[in-house]
Amino acid sequence: MQFEPKQPTAKGPAELFTGDVHFDVIARGDAPSRLRVNLVRFSPGARTAWHRHSLGQTLHVTDGIGLVQARRGDVRVMRPGDTVYTPPGEWHWHGASADSFMCHLAMWEDDDATWGDHVTDDEYGAAPIDLRG
Ligand code: MN
């Protein structure tokens, strides 16, 4: 058994995120495991830049109200308990809504996410689809 003490919270770099984003590394498997789990906290309005994961990514919202969008898709509201899977290679972004913090677990397996442009205010401000609104 390994007991993993809490690691310091890290700030998401401005090249990859808009606004204040902090993350805690929950798990990082030693090879051959590819397990990667982070707990990520977004301030209101904060979001990732556009990016993709070569082996996909699963997000699970634990708190607050979030937004997520795949390229050419609608902006979608995500709420605590929601799980969103982005398949390998799909460009997307995720973040908090404009007026709420959002916290999610991020689970993925690759170490080579590809990062693109920041999400513009126009992209971020598009009317989100809220299936539980
Ligand atoms: Mn992602």
Image: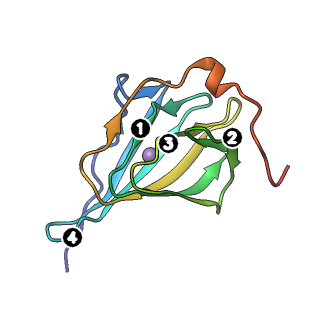
Nearer-N-terminus badge (1/4):
4
- Note whether ligand 1 is within 8 Å of mark 1: yes
Q: Is residue 131 above or below residue 50?
A: below
* Three-letter residue code for mark 4: Ser
Q: Where residue 51 is drawn, which disc sits there? A: 1
CA gap between label 1 and label 3 equals 18 Å
Find disc 4 in the rendering and name its residue: 33
- Note whether ligand 1 is within 8 Å of mark 3: no
Please say if the residues under marks 1 and 2 sit with CB atoms less than 8 Å apart.
Answer: no
Find disc 2 in the rendering and name its residue: 74
Q: Is residue 121 left or right of residue 47?
A: right
Nearer-N-terminus badge (3/2):
3
- The structure residue drawn at horizontal position 37% and vertical position 22%, both measured from the top left corner, is 14
* Three-letter residue code for mark 1: His
* Three-letter residue code for mark 3: Arg
Find disc 3 in the rendering and name its residue: 41
